[in-house]
Amino acid sequence: MGLEVSFLYLPLLSGLNTKSNMNINIPGLHNSDENHWQTIWENDHPSKFYRVIQSDWEKPDCVEWISKMEEELKQFDYKQLILIGHSVGCVTIIKWFEMYGHAIKGALFVAPSDVDSPGYPSYITGFNPMPASKLPFPTIVVASTDDHVVDFERAQLFARNWGSELVTLKEAGHIESKSGFGKWDFGLELIDRLKQMKVA
């Protein structure tokens, strides 16, 4: 698995040691399993990572998912949050922002699924159309060249539309535990990168 990046990295999770600087994991369909990088980050850094737990992981409903996000995130200072989405969790973050409008510190979108794809599962409801507006907070899109959930060209389009920095992983699948992404330190480096970014 290769990667194309063009920036220097800072020490992992520098300064992210208070609840006000929490990193919020928003998993996708089926939740993130015990070998998934989101779970490992939570286990390795329990004071720095928090997961929004959805009531139904098997049949995601956009209204329910973003409502649950809002309910659970009220305990935090929105402006200090880094939101970390995987797959349809990325779209959930943007739909939540479109609904509630809270300013956040930044968002990391890993392998965003294409909810407008003709073959997208019908039991994942309410997430389309795919958000296409520029986001007013720093964002990074991490996309694989061979993700079965989204064509790479579409992922590139999402990054352009959202005003995101694009990080490309070559032949990385859906960037999950099944494709070998467990203890993913590079992802932690991207969180530090987000902390230094400003909206263009």
Image: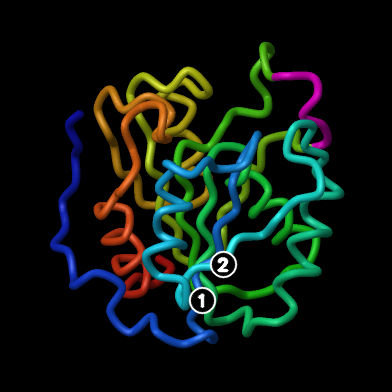
Q: Is residue 96 visible?
A: yes
What is the x, y in percent for residue 15? 33, 84
Q: Quadrant of the N terminus?
A: top left
> Quarter holding the C terminus?
bottom left
Q: Position of residue 19 (x, y in %)?
A: 53, 85
Amino acid at dot 2: Tyr
Characterize the local packing of mark 2: few (<14), some (14-19) or many (20 or more) Cα atoms within 10 angstroms.
many
Picture residue at 75% right of the left edge, 32% below the top: 58
Residue at image x 40%, y 70%?
45
Please report the residue visible at 38 percent of the width from the left and 72 percent of the height from the top. 198
Residue 28 sits above or below residue 51 on the image = above
Callout 2: SS? strand
The residue identified by callout 2 is 50
* Labelled disc at residue 62: none
Q: Earlier in the sequence, mark 2 or mark 1?
A: 1
Residue 137 visible to the viewer: no
| Residue that appears at 45% across and 58% down | 139
Q: Is residue 175 above or below residue 39?
A: above
Q: Give the main secondary structure of the magenta stretch.
A: loop
Residue type (three-letter) at the residue carrying disc 1: Met
Are circles 2 and 1 on residues that touch, CB within 8 Å? yes
Disc 2 and disc 1: Cα gap in Å?
A: 7 Å
Q: Which residue is label 1 attached to?
A: 22
Q: Which residues are magenta?
A: 121-126
**Vertical arrangement, residue 19 with respect to residue 151, above or below:** below
Residue 122 in the magenta stretch? The answer is yes
Comparing 66 with 159, the one in front is 66
Where is residue 34 drawn, in percent x and y?
A: 48, 44
Farthest residue, direction top: 119
Q: Name the one closer to the observer, 38 or 62.
A: 38
- Specify few, some or many for label 1: CA neighbours under 10 Å numbering under 14, 14-19, or 20 or more: many
| 141 shown above or below 129 | below
